[in-house]
Image (cartoon, rainbow, N blue to C red):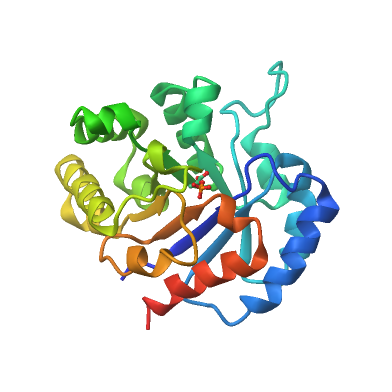
Amino acid sequence: MRKPIIGGNWKMNRGIPSDTVNMLKKLIPSVKKVNSVDIVIAPPFTALGSAVEITKKSNIKIGAQNMYFEETGAYTGEISSLFLKKLGVEYVILGHSERRDIFKESDELINKKLKKALSMKLNPIVCIGEHLEERDAGKTKEVIHNQIHNTFKNLTKEDLIKTVIAYEPIWAIGTGKTATPEQTEEIHLFIREILELKYDSETANAIRIQYGGSIKPTNAKELFEKENIDGGLVGGASLQADSLFEIIKAADATTK
Ligand code: PEP
């Protein structure tokens, strides 16, 4: 059985350390008894140190929203996996659609980052997903197939299993439009089919696939009840402790 994972992607919000700490101080006691869901919070880089410190004795893990694949050197503005690791960060989100679209990150670049994260024993959450025009043109599966093929290129099955995939249809991110549980389940099954062909059925069944795109307390339950949806990557609704806790509870309920 796959353990659901809920990630809170705070994007460029709550980057002032005291702001992060205040939110986490509310979340920590409420999730204390949740042990069947992995909980990951990804604040901006500036608040990572404080987030690691405040969550040390809790069941919340801290993730970064990005990293570069080199360890040190002349890469102005970049943050390496080594720095994250030394800070006590355990997860890293890679290839978010905002990184792909705004900062022009390619599958090839994400593949390099992914391999580096894995070699540094950071747990990667890799985002994939189609634009609205691609869905409307009936190209969703082609896009997903290509992203998986390129982003996971030359990855061993041992490494693949350590990776979390976040299926995030771009038209559903921050728009209030959620993919239906049925639409999501179809794509998650398709992802497992691709991975079964590329690796084997054991690997395809072991990997966790989250959904992301306007998850809220009101729609979380119906999404997480689907067999192939292993939790979610949450943007807007992860900024407040109350709404995030409701979403975590919905994931927890599917394990009972
Ligand atoms: C995200 O940024 O990964 C995301 C899914 O955002 P939202 O929940 O706000 O749509």
How many numbered marks appear?
0
Of the 4 image quadrants, the one containing the N terminus is bottom left
| In this view, 68 is above or below 19 | above
- Residue farthest toward the top in the current orientation of the protein: 74
- Residue farthest toward the front in the current orientation of the protein: 176
Q: Which of these two is toward me, 181 or 65?
A: 181
Which residue is painted at 36% across and 61% down in the image? 230
Locate residue 182, reporting x and y percent.
23, 57
On screen, residue 56 versus residue 249, left or right, reads right
Locate residue 217, reporting x and y percent.
49, 66
Which residue is painted at 33% across and 67% down in the image? 222
Regarding residue 44, the answer to whether it shows in the image is: yes
| In this view, 70 is above or below 51 | above
Regarding residue 153, the answer to whether it shows in the image is: no
Of the 4 image quadrants, the one containing the C terminus is bottom left
Q: Which of these two is toward me, 235 or 125?
A: 235
On screen, residue 207 versus residue 30, left or right, reads left
Locate residue 194, reporting x and y percent.
19, 42
- Among the 4 quarters of the image, the one containing residue 59: bottom right
| In this view, 111 is above or below 2 | above
| In this view, 194 is above or below 26 | above
